Amino acid sequence: MNITRTVPVALLILILSPCLQAVRAVETDHAFGVSYSTGASDLFQEIELDVEWPIGFSYRPHWNFESGLRIDLGIGPAIVGWGRVSTPLFGIYDIYLDVPVSTTVGYNFARERGVNPYLRGGLVVHFIDAEFSGDSTAAGVVGAGGLEWRNRRDLKVFTEVTYDSSDFDINTGFGLPRTAKLRDVSMAIGLIAVF
C-alpha cells in the first residue's frame, strides 16, 4: 500500500463525505398553492382592466436534503386579467396572462419538526401575453419566506410571502412606454403532497 496516495485520498473522502450527504435528497414535495399578488392588483388598476383577478395558481416541486438545503422549481402563480385597456384616445380589448417560471435555493430550519420555517431565493422569468405589453418576457430576482405545517406524513400545509423584482414596459398608446412592476409582494397558501 502506497501511504503517499492513501492518506490524501482518505482525507479527501473525509472532507467530501458531509458534502455528499448534503446532496442526497430525502424527500420530494409537490406544493400546490393559491396566491394573491399586490403587484398584479396595482398593475390592473393602473391600466384600468374591466375584470381583475390578481389571484394566481402555482405548482412548485421541491427537493429537501438532510443538511436543510432545498431546491425549488416553480410554475406560477399564473395570473389572468381581461377587459378594455384605457389609452389617451381609445381603448383596446385585451387579455393579460402572466405565467412565471422560477428556480430557487433555500434552507429548511426545522424540516423534521411539526412546523418548519424556511427561506428561499433565486431567479424568475415571467412569460407575458398582453397587447399593451412591450415585452413578452420579464426577469427578476425572487425571495420568499414561509412556514410548513406537517399534519400527516404525506400532507403538509404552507403559507408563504414572496417578493419579486420583475418589471416590464407598458405601452398605453401615444405616450412613452413606462415601466411597471409585475409583483411587489405575493401572499400564498396551499397544500404540499409528500412523495
Image (cartoon, rainbow, N blue to C red):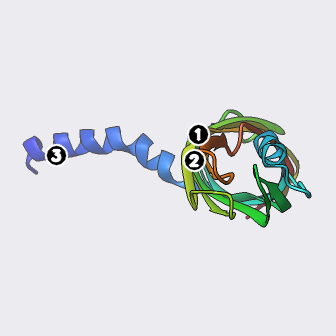
Q: Residue at x 69, y 63 (%)?
A: 130
Which of discs 3 and 2 lies nearer the camera? The answer is 2
- On the rendered structure, is 75 left or right of 80? left
**For the residue marked with disc 2, what is the amino acid?**
Thr
- On the rendered structure, is 83 left or right of 20? right
Kindly state the secondary structure of the residue where label 3 is placed: helix
- What mark, if any, has residue 6 been given in the picture? 3
State whether residue 189 is above or below residue 108.
Answer: below
Kindly state the secondary structure of the residue where label 2 is placed: strand
* Of pointers 1 and 2, the one earlier in the residue sequence: 2
Kindly state the secondary structure of the residue where label 1 is placed: strand
Distance Cα–Cα, label 1 vs label 3: 40 Å
Mark 1 crowd level (few <14, some 14–19, many ≥20, 10 Å Cα): many
Q: Nearer the viewer, residue 41 or 179?
A: 179
Badges 3 and 2: C-beta atoms under 8 Å apart? no
Q: Residue at x 60, y 54 (%)?
A: 102
* Of pointers 1 and 3, the one earlier in the residue sequence: 3
Instruction: Look at mark 2 in the image and give the residue it sits on.
Output: 104
Q: Nearer the viewer, residue 92 or 115?
A: 92
Q: Is residue 153 visible?
A: no
